[in-house]
Every structure is written in structure tokens, then in C-alpha cells.
Image: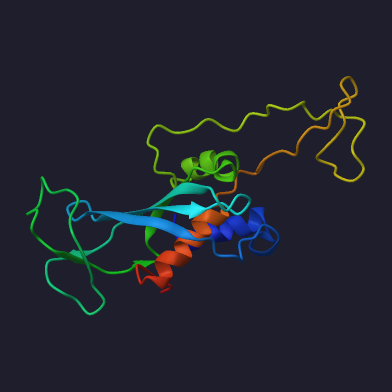
Amino acid sequence: MTLKEIGFSLGRYRPAARTSAGYSNNLKVFGYRYEAYPTLQKVNHFARVQSQSDPGHTWSVGIYFEGVPFSNEPTEHGIPVNPTDKGRVDKNSLYYIEPASYNTTKVKIYCACPDSQFSFEYQNYIAGANPDRYGYRPYTRKTVPIPTRPRNPRNPNTAIDPVTGKKGRDFVNPKNYSGHCKHIYSFVNYLISSGLVSMV
């Protein structure tokens, strides 16, 4: 998937995500670093992004681009990088990469936050947009199951357990839409503003 495709899928799952969920607010990015693999044509970007609910806390994020062209010579829009797979290339070589495309470059994404873990980790994995090669299990409810009746009149997906009187939580992403959290959203904007991702 591309960042554009993941964003489109997110919009189907959370139509108001960029407003009600705070996606319109860019969170602070700290400790940016990259890994560049010329022989594999891959570039991985890492950072920690500020938590919106607890500004003193940060979440680890990663964006992994595939099919990135590398050049030994400077190009018009080339960004100089030092190679990470130094066992396969000259460790003193300097390579140049073109900015990854928001619309066309294949990508995998990761964030350690609970929203990403419970809402999108498995969904992104089955869509090929999660970097973990071992995979994830589907989300399993840990709260009380939603009984058939009585239903909560304010939310048809939530109900009161007739035995315990506890309210079950809504189902999480039942249609398995791919997507990303606000920390990935902020990191993508950081990469765009840094010239590492283009909107073409």
C-alpha cells in the first residue's frame, strides 16, 4: 500500500479522523534517524512522536519505504544518505535518494501506541502495510461481550451486560480497514516538510 491508499482507507474507517481525533494537529517529533539500504532499494525512517494525551510521553514510530531509487551521483532532487548495509556496499560511499512519493511509493508503517496496536496493527498486516514479518492475531475483545438485548439506545454497538450491569466497549475496526494513528500522521508531515516525502 501507499500512504495515499492507507489514508483513504483510514477515511472510510474514521471519516472525521482529521478533526475529532486530533489528526489536524501536528505533534512534536524527536530523535529522527534513518536506515538506507541501496542494494534493497529501501529507506526506513524512525522517530519518537509526542503523545497528545500526555505531552511528556512519546511513542516510537517507523515508516518503511520500498522501491526507492538510489544513485551514486548527485541528482536534481537527490538527498544524500550514508548506506546502512555496509557489508554489501562501500562503507565510505555516499548515495543519493529521490524523495519517496506519497501517492506511489509502497510503504509499511508502525507505531507503538495503543490506538495503532488495537485499531490497525492486524489490519495493516493483512494488507501488507505492517513491517512485522511474524504477523498479528485479530483483535479479541477483553471486555464483556455485547448481548443481543438490552441495547444501549445511544449506541447500537454498545450494550449493558444483563448479569454484571457493565457496559461493553464498541467493536474495534470490525471491517478491517487499514489506517494509521495521529503519531504516524504527524511523522508523515514531518517527512514531507523535510523534503523526504513528496506529494507527487
> What residue appears at the point 80 percent right and 30 percent down from the top-left corner?
146
Q: Where is residue 145 in the image (x, y as percent from the top left)?
A: 77, 27
The residue lying toward the viewer, choosing from 187 and 96, is 187
Residue 7 appears in which quarter of the rendering? bottom right
Residue 104 in the figure: left or right of residue 114:
left
Above or below, 163 against 167 in this view is above
Name the image quarter holding the C terminus: bottom left
The residue lying toward the viewer, choosing from 116 and 15, is 116
Q: Where is residue 65 in the image (x, y as percent from the top left)?
A: 34, 56
Outermost residue to the top: 163
Name the image quarter holding the N terminus: bottom left
Residue 154 in the figure: left or right of residue 70:
right
Q: Position of residue 32 (x, y in %)?
A: 36, 57
Outermost residue to the front: 56
Above or below, 87 against 133 in this view is below
* Scheme of colours in the image: rainbow
Q: In the rendered picture of this protein, how many numbered marks are placed on residues?
A: 0
The residue lying toward the viewer, choosing from 199 and 60, is 60
Residue 89 in the figure: left or right of residue 192:
left
Residue 27 in the figure: left or right of residue 167:
left
Whether residue 102 can be seen here? no
Above or below, 79 against 130 in this view is below
Whether residue 136 can be seen here? yes
> What residue appears at the point 53 percent right and 48 percent down from the top-left corner?
57
Q: Where is residue 35 in the image (x, y as percent from the top left)?
A: 27, 52
> What residue appears at the point 44 percent right and 65 percent down from the top-left corner?
190
